[in-house]
Amino acid sequence: MKKFAFKILKKDNFARCGLIETHRGNIKTPVFMPVGTQATVKACTIDDIKKTGSEIILSNTYHLMIRPGVERIQQAGGLHKFMNCDLPILTDSGGFQVMSLSKLNRIDKEKGAIFNSHVDGKKYFLSPEESIRIQLGLDSDIVMIMDECPKKTNDYEIIKKSMNLSLYWAERSKKAFGNIPHKALFGIIQGGLFKDLRAQSLNELEKINFDGYALGGLAVGESQNEMFQVLDDIKYDMPFEKPHYLMGVGTPSDILGAVKRGIDMFDCVLPTRSGRTGLAFTWEGRINLKNNKYRNDNSPLDKECDNFNLNKYSKNYLNHLFNTNEILASMLLSLHNINFYQELMRAIRYNIGKGTFEEFHNKYINKL
């Protein structure tokens, strides 16, 4: 079975084009991963997701352990068969959802996260070992370590304590994962907005030795400039030969700025969440299709987009669908937004390859 591997093909300052190799297929980077939280990318079929050029999706340990449960997915032959997806799948560890969704949670150094389900209040225990067991049970291709994702705070001691706990759990996650050459285990760098804690976290994670390194604890309420500062602070120290993943990010301009600072992998619910609420991403900027000014606008949403013939649908028609709560509205716009994100990633890779990424970045960073 093909081993997990990563190689850099081209650089333009810190921006990188690369290739992740997995036994389920190759992934061109920088890459955007559509989010299939509950074994589905909302309002889209897997076949359509593939037609956008998506080469990997993300799914969620927390949600799948609650519903339908890992045993049910294992009985079906693993997550890929369960959801009819032959693309590589990355699963997150559940730490962020424990922090943001559970009705009641507490952290125990040894037992892990102890929390009540946001669905029915049932009590769960999620240790580093259990998180890895679930992700391997799902047959994930890229597994994330169990970490604590604290809420945004400027309290240095709270962030330091959380970072040290995440490092302890990282060691336990690595031990529980073992050696599986055709799968990858990524470490997660914590440390909030503090440069020294981020550096310490990365240094200790490198000693453990992971297949890739993610930045966690962002996209939790900080400004874009604060996020970019974290990336600027750490970009010189990130291991060159490993993929760099910015978790839960973000807007098109977030992605452009992060690629400029050496990030290779992204995921975010924004394309589909926005698609369900009438917000479209286009090369001319964002469009709120619920706005009355589109009621008589018969021009296509994006005349340049011929994928799926999405340009056959006028702004007028889409405005009507949203204002009458038709399901087709969410389907069309979610697919449009994911398609736009993949167009963006292809353009990013093209410009890095041509050595023109800085010009491309500057053209669109304040527009998208």
Image: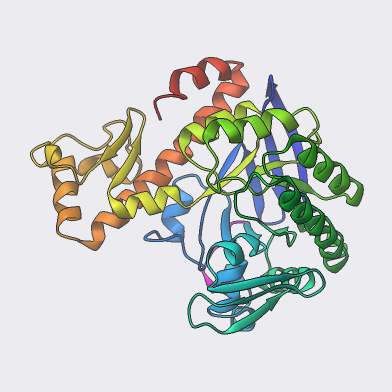
Q: Position of residue 36 (x, y in %)?
A: 51, 61
Which residue is at 70% across, 44% downward? 20
Which residue is at 27% across, 49% downward? 278
Above or below for 219 versus 164: above
Above or below for 94 versus 362: below
Between 68 and 141, the one nearer to me in the picture: 68
Confirm whether the magenta stretch covers residue 349: no
Q: Position of residue 212 (x, y in %)?
A: 76, 46
Q: Is residue 262 visible?
A: no
Q: Position of residue 234 (x, y in %)?
A: 74, 32
Confirm whether the magenta stretch covers residue 85: yes
User: In the picture provided, is 211 more to the left or to the right than 250?
Assistant: right
User: In the picture provided, is 171 more to the left or to the right than 365?
Assistant: right
Which residue is at 65% across, 35% downward? 263
User: In the picture provided, is 59 more to the left or to the right than 111?
Assistant: left
Span shown in magenta: 81-88
